[in-house]
Image (cartoon, grey):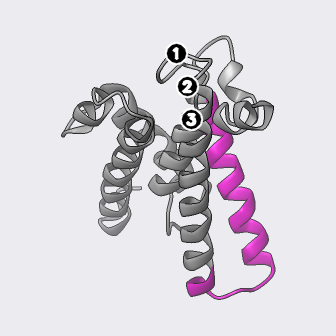
């Protein structure tokens, strides 16, 4: 159970006394920035980075849902301590952006906007009250953030 609490709480960031979802999202964006910097310094191809990031997102998505299912036995549904969904969501938001810190910051801000306000069907997932819905509302928030961020980058707004 301890491992599942560590995973679900985003290495403990979910225990932050204020804004645990934001704390988890910040951890997520820092981890992705670090990972992509390492891959960049290794000189791997962009295709490798995209495939690797995709596999990491999928792995953490499934292991996160597994941990969410386990901690739901002792924590309330979608407890504030559960932030692995924010980590996956912000990784999706920053998927395939260049290593400019501004892009990662915008991905974080956009993701938190969509995650907090839950527009465009996100709230429907949130209301389902299943182990998967805890994760999927943040996945959708990440997808919306990714679309908006890519548009902002394409039109040279950021």
Q: Residue furthest front?
A: 73
Residue at figure coordinates x 59%, y 39% from the top left: 84
The label on residue 110 is none
Q: Position of residue 107 (x, y in %)?
A: 47, 49
Rendered position, 2 above or below 48? above
Residue ID for mark 2: 72
Quarter of the figure with residue 128:
top left
At mark 1, the secondary structure is: loop
The label on residue 76 is 1
Q: Position of residue 153 (x, y in %)?
A: 38, 63
Rendered position, 56 above or below 2? below
In this view, the residue in front, 58 or 89, is 58
Q: Residue furthest top?
A: 17
Within the magenta stretch, is there residue 145? no
Which residues, given as a range, are shown in magenta?
23-48
Check the picture and name the quadrant holding the C terminus: bottom left
Q: Position of residue 123 (x, y in %)?
A: 25, 30
* First in sequence: mark 3 vs mark 1: 3
Q: Tell me whether circle 2 and circle 3 mark residues in contact (CB < 8 Å).
A: yes
Could you give the CA–CA distance between mark 2 and mark 3, rounded to whole angstroms? 6 Å
Q: Tell me whether circle 1 and circle 2 mark residues in contact (CB < 8 Å).
A: yes
Quarter of the figure with residue 54:
bottom right
Within the magenta stretch, is there residue 31? yes
The label on residue 68 is 3
In this view, the residue in front, 122 or 99, is 122
Could you give the CA–CA distance between mark 1 and mark 2, rounded to whole angstroms? 6 Å
Could you give the CA–CA distance between mark 3 and mark 1, rounded to whole angstroms? 10 Å
Give the overall secondary structure of the magenta segment. helix
Quarter of the figure with residue 58:
bottom right
Residue at figure coordinates x 62%, y 18% from the top left: 74
Q: Tell me whether circle 3 and circle 1 mark residues in contact (CB < 8 Å).
A: no
Q: Residue furthest left?
A: 120
């Amino acid at each position: 159970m301890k491992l599942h609490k560590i995973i679900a709480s985003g290495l403990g960031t979910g225990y932050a006394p204020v804004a645990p979802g934001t704390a988890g999202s910040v951890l997520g964006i820092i981890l992705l920035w670090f990972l992509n910097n390492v891959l960049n310094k290794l000189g791997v191809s962009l295709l490798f980075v995209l495939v690797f990031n995709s596999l990491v997102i999928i792995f953490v998505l499934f292991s996160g849902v597994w941990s969410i299912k386990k901690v739901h036995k002792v924590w309330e549904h979608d407890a504030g301590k559960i932030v692995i969904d924010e980590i996956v969501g912000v990784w999706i938001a920053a998927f395939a952006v260049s290593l400019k810190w501004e892009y990662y910051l915008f991905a974080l801000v956009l993701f938190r906007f969509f995650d907090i306000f839950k527009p465009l069907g996100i709230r429907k997932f949130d209301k389902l009250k299943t182990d998967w819905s805890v994760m999927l509302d943040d996945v959708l928030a990440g997808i919306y953030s990714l679309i908006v961020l890519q548009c902002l980058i394409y039109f040279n707004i950021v």
